[in-house]
């Protein structure tokens, strides 16, 4: 199948938004050599096996194993709690938000919870509402050593053993490194079912590994559709026709806006509540991959473009005033949905009051989509650039495309900028200081 | 009672974070005259009656009326749906998120829903889950003309009348202008109970009017505590001792960081899930009030500082890499909680594995608060400024203080910058274009 999300980059052009924040055709044309070199660089690294995330949608045997496990588990559990933080929670949570209430979801699906944070009030509240006899805990940490996740695991493990005695391990499911780390060791010694994360796939690129697919399958989502969508995007976004490749155009647009026009913020703004989790997922992807002090040559660059999320039409009543009139430092990436799956007609109740009657006979889909187009036009008239991704529908196939397109865009941006998009050296100090503080050393 | 949120501004100082993003004592000292002039300006405008939001916490008779109404309504309804968008939903939603599960909440409180957006899927899904015979719809629009809210009202109104015949009006509650607009006219002609919004209080400053207080009271929150907290902050933040006034220091810090150090983004980052809604509420307040093309003299300034939200510790695994190593364009405003109300002990389960045993005996509160301090220190060492507000507890008294402090900070910032913080001219074009598009004119 072909990818069917449609990307529109017209509104980043100088002909649309003017010189202050718009890119000229020349700005893009000048990059053609570098674009080709970056494309070849990615191809080589992929051939060497350095970028295994590209190939995840083809791992059909893993998907089958996951679906088999999930089908059985859905019969045994009313609730699934994913214990993981950052990439181990954002991606799977976004899938659940986007697809978890769609009519094609398995009817027997348990509720899926993502406590994510180590907030004592939230975690206690959640545990208090669960029936442990009918709950499965999916503990997810690639290294097996994430403190927040281990803390949650220890708490849950004690309660499970207290309640279920030697059957506690049937309520645990690990997703971790195939060989290394605490979680793998515990899985082996305590006979806990554990799925593997490919060691070459980092947290924020892990949504199509068991990290994302297990909770998705447990929640009854269309996991095959997700992989098929990702596969279609992988094909589209590795094409040698570089300037029609949406991943490359997305990355190139944002990087040039940052470097040539000082556009430091990219706002992802779906006009659809279900897509808001994807904006959260993108936030981590773009921020953590590209926000770097050093480039690959070891030079200080302090590069970064701040990804933020907003929700249309809601945030027209909150953030859009700033987007329209504030500094010229933002590009908006709209997510538009053609068919919301459901529609609601606004009735005619006050025929004698033209202002109220105006809305009668129209639908909420028409209203929200008209607002998107109006905001896009208003921003364009105010000289503010935007990009749009049009989702034909909110389904697994579209979401899979979106995920893969942005993952490829992110590694492309890293290669283009000469930045390593796969590490996160800046968070080590905080980890060390947390341990020191708890040990009473600071 | 005295205010007891503690603000810490040490980490915006050059002595802590260096010259690149830190303010010197001289930077602040130079402002003393302008600070005093701004203070006097606000006092005068308040005395003239131009800033009525300051006095909202004293309106005891309104609070009593609201509580009386809510006590009765709580007996009749299992669900309350607030139909409003932007300021009509963000504030009341934030209160519910912060306080709605606290033990002091009224036990008979109905569920409160904030659909906010005009997303057809969400709205249909919500309406499908409600028992209309036990549901109250609180329709909130100050002007009485907000299209999204009117569309929701028309849909609901038809369904109520279909189900409840001439009793439909008992399931409607309006919050709107005392005299003007569609909603007021409908309330009068159809005998629908309606509360008033002071015409001098704009949407984003309306949380202590019936806009915020009605849903709060219906949800069984401690409305008196909220007003008392706001009142305590009002006293603290109008003091003539300007440099210990937290609202003024907050505003001055952010404005100087923007103007002297090019710090274009302020990230509000609670280490507590319940406070995340307050960060959303602040986003609107700071963005819409200060993001302006023209100053009061009519000069083009394109001023603005982008408020964003993050969640600690979760976003240490997402955004903090960028905050640590990206451009020097951010100040973080941490919200820390001393007593989370509940705690969870991490048990010792693997005494022979030091890495795992390290966490045993500690609590989730210790962990999350240690992470906050570690992140603050790491950012400081990386030359990144921050502010902290320490909440002794998450209760109505603290939340009330916080709201009033930031409202005063916002009008102070407007006065200091010579910007009108009470209008939003930049969103008009989008409204016009939406209507045109729906009318088939564009």
Image (spheres, coloured by chain):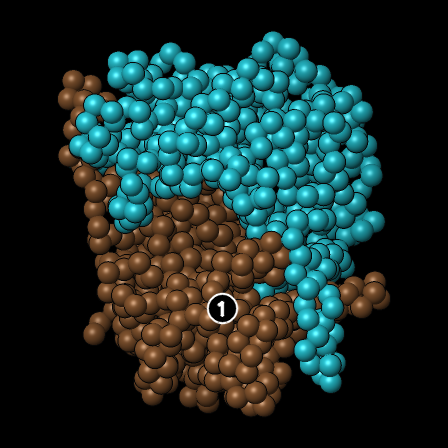
Chain colours: A cyan, B brown
Residue at the location (26% across, 13% down)?
A189
| Picture quarter with the N terminus of chain B | bottom left
User: The residue tagged with tag 1: helix, strand or loop?
Assistant: helix
Q: Position of residue B34 (x, y in %)?
A: 45, 72
Name the foreground residue: B248 vs A194. A194
Residue at the location (56% across, 79% down)?
B165
**10 Å neighbourhood of mark 1: few (<14), some, or many (≥20)?**
many
Residue at the location (21% across, 42% down)?
B344
- Among all residues in the image, which is located at the extreme top? A48
Q: Position of residue A373 (x, y in %)?
A: 74, 56
Q: Relative to B285, does residue A58 appear above or below in the rendering?
A: above
Q: Position of residue B384 (x, y in %)?
A: 41, 44
Can residue A384 be seen in the rendering of this structure? yes
The number of numbered badges drawn on the structure is: 1
- Left/right placement of residue B122 relative to residue A398 reads left
Q: Relative to A221, does residue B303 appear above or below in the rendering?
A: below
Residue A103, image quadrant: top right
Can residue B366 be seen in the rendering of this structure? no
Name the foreground residue: A217 vs B185. A217
| Picture quarter with the C terminus of chain B | bottom right
**Residue carrying label 1:** B132
Q: Relative to A284, does residue B152 appear above or below in the rendering?
A: below
Chain letter of disc 1 in the image: B
Residue at the location (64% across, 10% down)?
A47
Name the foreground residue: A77 vs A297. A77
- Left/right placement of residue B2 relative to residue A299 reads left
Name the foreground residue: B293 vs A343. A343
- Left/right placement of residue A442 relative to residue B179 reads left
Q: Position of residue A51 (x, y in %)?
A: 58, 18
């Amino acid at each position: 199948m072909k990818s069917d999300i449609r990307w529109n980059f017209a509104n980043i052009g100088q002909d649309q938004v003017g010189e202050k924040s718009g890119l000229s055709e020349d700005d893009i044309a000048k990059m053609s050599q570098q674009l080709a070199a970056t494309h070849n660089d990615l191809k080589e690294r992929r051939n060497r096996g350095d970028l295994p995330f590209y190939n995840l949608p083809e791992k059909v045997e893993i998907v089958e194993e996951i679906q088999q496990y999930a089908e059985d588990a859905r019969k045994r559990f009313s609730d699934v709690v994913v214990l993981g933080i950052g990439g181990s929670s954002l991606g799977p949570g976004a899938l659940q938000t986007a697809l978890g209430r769609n009519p094609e979801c398995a009817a027997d699906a348990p509720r899926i919870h993502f406590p994510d944070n180590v907030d004592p009030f939230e975690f206690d509240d959640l545990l208090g509402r669960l029936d442990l006899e009918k709950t499965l805990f999916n503990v997810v940490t690639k290294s097996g050593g994430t403190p927040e996740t281990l803390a949650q695991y220890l708490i849950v493990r004690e309660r499970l053993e207290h309640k279920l005695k030697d059957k506690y391990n049937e309520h645990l499911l690990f997703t971790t490194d195939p060989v290394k780390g605490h979680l793998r060791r515990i899985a082996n010694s305590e006979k806990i079912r554990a799925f593997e994360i490919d060691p070459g796939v980092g947290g924020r690129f892990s949504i199509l590994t068991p990290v994302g697919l297990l909770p998705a399958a447990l929640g009854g989502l269309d996991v095959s559709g997700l992989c098929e969508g990702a596969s279609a995007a992988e094909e589209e976004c590795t094409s040698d026709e570089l300037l029609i490749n949406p991943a490359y155009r997305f990355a190139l647009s944002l990087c040039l806006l940052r470097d040539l026009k000082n556009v430091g913020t990219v706002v992802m703004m779906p006009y659809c509540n279900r897509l808001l989790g994807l904006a959260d997922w993108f936030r981590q992807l773009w921020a953590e991959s590209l926000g770097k002090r050093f480039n690959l040559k070891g030079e200080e660059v302090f590069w970064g473009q701040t990804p933020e999320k907003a929700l249309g039409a809601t945030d027209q009543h909150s953030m859009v005033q700033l987007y329209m009139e504030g500094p010229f430092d933002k590009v908006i990436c709209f997510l538009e949905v053609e068919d919301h799956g459901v529609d609601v007609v606004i009735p005619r109740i006050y025929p004698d009051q033209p202002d109220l009657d105006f809305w009668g006979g129209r639908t909420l889909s028409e209203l929200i989509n008209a607002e998107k187009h109006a905001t896009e036009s208003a921003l364009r008239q105010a000289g503010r650039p935007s990009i749009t991704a049009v989702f034909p529908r909110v389904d697994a196939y579209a979401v899979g495309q979106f995920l893969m397109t942005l993952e490829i865009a992110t590694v492309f941006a890293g290669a283009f900028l000469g930045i390593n998009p796969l590490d996160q050296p800046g968070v080590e100090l905080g980890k060390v200081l947390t341990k020191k503080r708890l040990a009473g050393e600071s």
